[in-house]
Amino acid sequence: MDNEEKLELAKDPKTSVKILEKLAKEDDSYIRWHVARNPKTPVKTLAKFAKDEDWDIRYAVATNPSASASILETLANDESTLVHVGVARNPNAPVHVLEELAKSDDIDVRSSVTANPKVIIGILKAIANSKSPHVWLKTESGDDQVLVRIVADRKSPIGIRYESVEIPERSDV
């Protein structure tokens, strides 16, 4: 089987677990990346990939909808901020992991936390009260993002509100 055929199998969510486990041992990192993204890849294989030396393989695991809470907990401590973004976006991320990621100085990590369906008001309030209350929010069309600041607001029914933030023009560009 050539690499193109292996790649197609790695991408296909209908590929058997047995074949995915075999493909996970390939030297080609692009094939392994697709195996790590495949929702049918077994948790034990994802756990091995979570320790891969390539950050992009670990990111693929972090975004995999089949990644377990324990794998996501491990990846939340990864050295790569991009892996943290993947964990923050994953609906399987435990709330306590989202709480920790919300403390990040990285705007993309915080923004991903706010977009997670498990995010709770307490996390948003913590961001509002932090030294870094800015996040990116998708517009209604979903095509663009706007920079906002989360502000604690006792008058709001949920205790927070979003304020638009002007992005300053840079004169040195």
Image: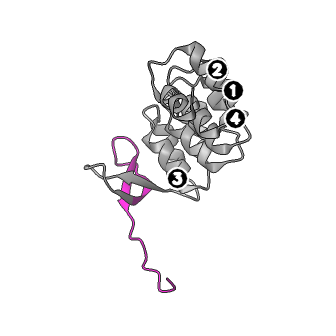
Earlier residue among tags 3 and 4: 4
Viewer-side residue, 3 vs 108 = 3
Look at the numbered discs 2 and 3 and tell me whether their residues touch, using CB distance below 8 Å.
Answer: no
- Across and down, in percent, residue 124 comes to 48, 44
| Mark 1 vs mark 4, CA separation in Å | 7 Å
Crowding at label 3, few (<14), some or many (≥20) Cα neighbours within 10 Å?
Answer: some
Q: Could you tell me which residue is drawn at 30 percent across and 48 percent down?
A: 142
Secondary element under disc 3, as helix, strand or loop, is helix
| Mark 1 vs mark 3, CA separation in Å | 32 Å
Label 2 belongs to which residue?
22
Amino acid under disc 3 = Asp
- Across and down, in percent, residue 114 comes to 46, 44
In the figure, 64 relative to 154: above or below?
A: above
Label 4 belongs to which residue?
27
Crowding at label 2, few (<14), some or many (≥20) Cα neighbours within 10 Å?
Answer: few
| Mark 2 vs mark 1, CA separation in Å | 6 Å
Label 3 belongs to which residue?
108
Foreground disc of the pair 3, 4: 4
Secondary element under disc 1, as helix, strand or loop, is loop
Q: Could you tell me which residue is drawn at 69 percent across and 32 percent down?
A: 74
| Mark 2 vs mark 3, CA separation in Å | 34 Å
Amino acid under disc 2 = Lys
- Across and down, in percent, residue 21 comes to 63, 19
